[in-house]
Image (spheres, rainbow, N blue to C red):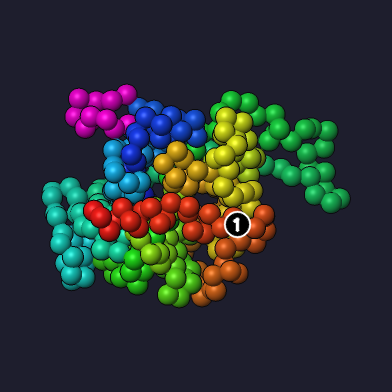
Amino acid sequence: MSLHRLTGLTLGVPDVASAAAYYAEFGLTPLASTPEQPPHTARFATVDGGEQLRIARSDRRRLLHLGIGADDPDDLDRVAASLTRFGVEVTRTGTSVRASDPGTEVTVEVTIAERVVAHDPPAPVAYNGPGEPVRAGERAPGILREGPVRPRKLGHVVLGSTDQQTSQRFFTEGIGFRVSDEVPGLAAFMRCSTDHHNVLVQQAPVSFLHHTAWQVDDIDEIGRGAKAMLETDPERHTWGLGRHHIGSNFFWYLKDPAGNFSEYYSDLDCVVEDALWKPGVWDGAQALYSWGPPPPPSFLAPEDLAALMSGAHSA
Ligand SMILES: [Fe+2]
């Protein structure tokens, strides 16, 4: 596969400062502003992905820009040609291809980028099993960790689309994503890397960003990260701890000051050989989670959806 990852995203929010404080506390590393950087924006890095989050001013919360990494210029030519065939306006520069998805209203830009390498990957955690005390005489490493949780990389985004079918085709036929699993007519889990999904588009009454997801080492890091965020503000809690059914990842969702959900996740399914993965067709309820507390209604339909809709219509 020539596409290989999400490079980063730009989050648009009404109040940049409060969102920036939230994502710093979430564990992303604030970057110093540069002379080229637009005013009133903030930039953040992950441990393995480098700069992956920009926050910019926007009248309503939304995903302004999504970056996709490709290996070489031939990939850009291929993406430009397929987007043109798909029928959207394409901006091609020497180093990028850019187009906007009509259903999610997100600007997607493919650039040539380094692949993500996990720096200093964690040692596999040994769990004591029945009759198998593999960690005999030692406390679990997960309870001994100290310091803030640091997300490794941006893993995926979930977008509401007013035209799910068209958005799915934009990402697959236009950009080159592959479908890993599907809830027909409602949602498609699509990948541009070996991760089970990098973009999930779901049918919605208005285009909006549902959540961004950030990989951490393991389930203990999910728990430690969420605990620290909730100690500051329990109202951030949205849904977790649980394990998704589609994608298998452990998850805990929190809410940023603008109303976007941010997810700590670990142990997502990987599709290394396309031929060895069989995409599934699911119904919505079964697909959502294997275990955990039931999702709150505000996860399925965020509380500001009506406000986003009226904002979109008056814009
Ligand atoms: Fe997610």
Callout 1: SS? loop
- Secondary structure mostly seen in magenta is loop
| Count of numbered labels shown in the rendering | 1
Magenta extent:
32-42
Q: Residue at x 84, y 51 (%)?
A: 130
Query: Magenta segment: does it hold 38?
Result: yes
Residue type indicated by callout 1: Pro
Q: Which residue is mark 1?
A: 295
Instruction: Pinpoint residue 220: horizontal percent, then vertical percent.
Output: 65, 40
Q: The N terminus lies in which quarter of the figure?
A: bottom left
The reply to whether residue 237 is in sight is: yes
Horizontally, residue 89 falls left or right of residue 281, namely: left
Q: Residue at x 57, y 63 (%)?
A: 288
The front one of 161 and 77 is: 161
Residue occupying image coordinates x 22% and y 61%: 79
242 displayed left or right of 86: right
